[in-house]
Image (spheres, grey):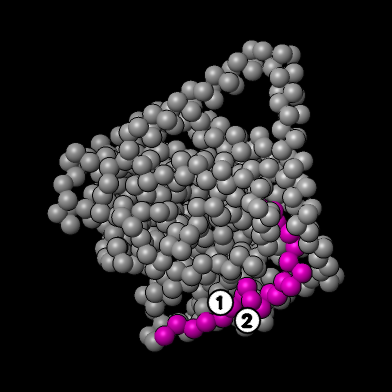
Amino acid sequence: MQTMSPLDASFLHVEDGVTHMHIGSVGIFEGPPPGAGEVKAAIAGRLPLVPRYRQKVRFVPLALGRPAWVDDPHFNLDYHVRRTALPSPGGDQELRNLVGRVMSQQLDRAKPLWELWLVDGFEDERFGIIYKTHHSMADGISATDVGMLLFDVEPKSEIVREEAPWSPNRPPSGARLLGQAVRGFFGMFGRTFRWLRNAAENPSRARRRASDGIVGLWEVGWNMARPAPKVAFNVEISPSRNFTWTSCPLDGLKQVKNVLGGTVNDVTLAVAAGALRRWLQSRDIETDELELKALVPVSVRTENEHGELGNRLTAMRGPLPVHIADPVERLHFAEREMDKLKASKQALGAEAIWGLNDWFRDFAPPLLLNPTAAINFSTRLFNMLVTNFPGPQVPFYVLGRELTGVYPIGFLARRHALAVAMFSYNGSMHFGLLGDREVITDIEQIAGYMDESVKELLDAAGASPSEVSPQFV
């Protein structure tokens, strides 16, 4: 049994009937689709590497503590690995429609919080895999690490079987969970004493950390007093989702940042802002005085934490300068604002908020979790999720079939009908756009605007898509 961190638990607490807090990806592979039995056998052989895949959520009675991960004694791989086929003609649009339907359904909290869909029925010789997991179980980096465990870095076709039958641990009783919550509450006094003792032994360090935390909390509070502007996609959302994607060469984005300045992340923010500017203008919305804000997750995962599930993130309120027409000026604005954020204590303030919950450890009732989760997912703070995380720059394989493209899927917070996730893989940057089907009815158009936004930056940097990559999707 393992108690969830405050951040992991927050993704469960903010979820409701329309706010689904699962994330995922859709991968496209070359070659004939493997059989469902082959895929299940390959996954079963590696389940010991990721024990969380056979654990479910157990809630503390009376909601007096954070939920815990416990072994599911009824775990059945057949429930989690499913097979389906695309309707005719079996193209990319049919796959996008399927992804939207899969992401519209919440995960069953009575079972381990993940699903994998094997998709065949393509018009040509390829197949897809849709992966879906709850954000309480993994962030983008840890999900990528797990993918590296489940996939191969060379085209192997043999199946690695599980060495020994799995024997689940006995689930904890409600009384045990309550007892742990009570111990967590009284343990708070011991932690307070140790903190005071450490502060007395090293007062300069304690003052520095306290000062950074206070400044960070002040910056978070100041941001709350300066709400993000409301735009066409900051409305009440439905449970229905739609999804699309586009890609561009990663070396093209690197050339843009090398010539024009900034980082690849700054470039992707400028790309997203350029696409949103076009889309808002297509709806006759004035953009010249409009500066949107993005929820930009930042990984704080250390090297020795790679391969571990769970969330090691903090968040920043990043710039989306849709008010700037010139693509180069837009990039320079994003670069300057991100530099200011990195130099600020905003991330420390977000960590301090979660630290309040962690102070109580196992005793952390919704009375504490709900307000801190509401602050981090507040409609007042940001307009949309824009997340970018690096992936492997070598090809991956499943049962000898090469993964040719992988498109990340974010989540939609309350009153946020659009999210953009980005993932670099094997020389390409893949953009995944998730929308509310009832609000964002033209999500393909936004993807087209992403392409235009990339192209204008490539042109400004003196490169064209054909010069940096043989294909621009």
Residue pointed to by mark 1:
118
Mark 2, Cα crowd under 10 Å, few <14 / some 14-19 / many 20+, is some
Q: Residue drawn 77% across and 41% down?
A: 183
Q: Secondary structure at mark 2?
A: helix
76 falls in the magenta region: yes
Q: Earlier in the sequence, mark 2 or mark 1?
A: 2
Above or below 19: residue 222: above
Identity of the residue drawn at 67% across and 37% down: 360
Residue 207 visible in this rendered orientation of the protein: yes
Disc 1 marks which amino acid? Answer: Leu
Placement of 204 over or under 2, stated as above or below:
above
> Which stretch appears magenta?
67-87
Label 2 close to label 1 by CB (< 8 Å): yes
* Quarter placement of the C terminus: bottom left
The numbered mark at residue 210 is: none
Quadrant of residue 284 within the rendered picture: bottom left
For the residue pair 53 and 275, the one nearer the viewer reads as: 53
Query: What residue would you read off at disc 2?
Result: 36
Q: Residues within 10 Å of mark 1 (few under 14, many from 20)?
A: many
Q: Is residue 37 magenta?
A: no
Q: Name the kind of residue labelled 2 in the image.
A: Ala
Please name the residue shown 66% across and 56% down the image. 59
Residue 443: image location, x then y, percent? 31, 64
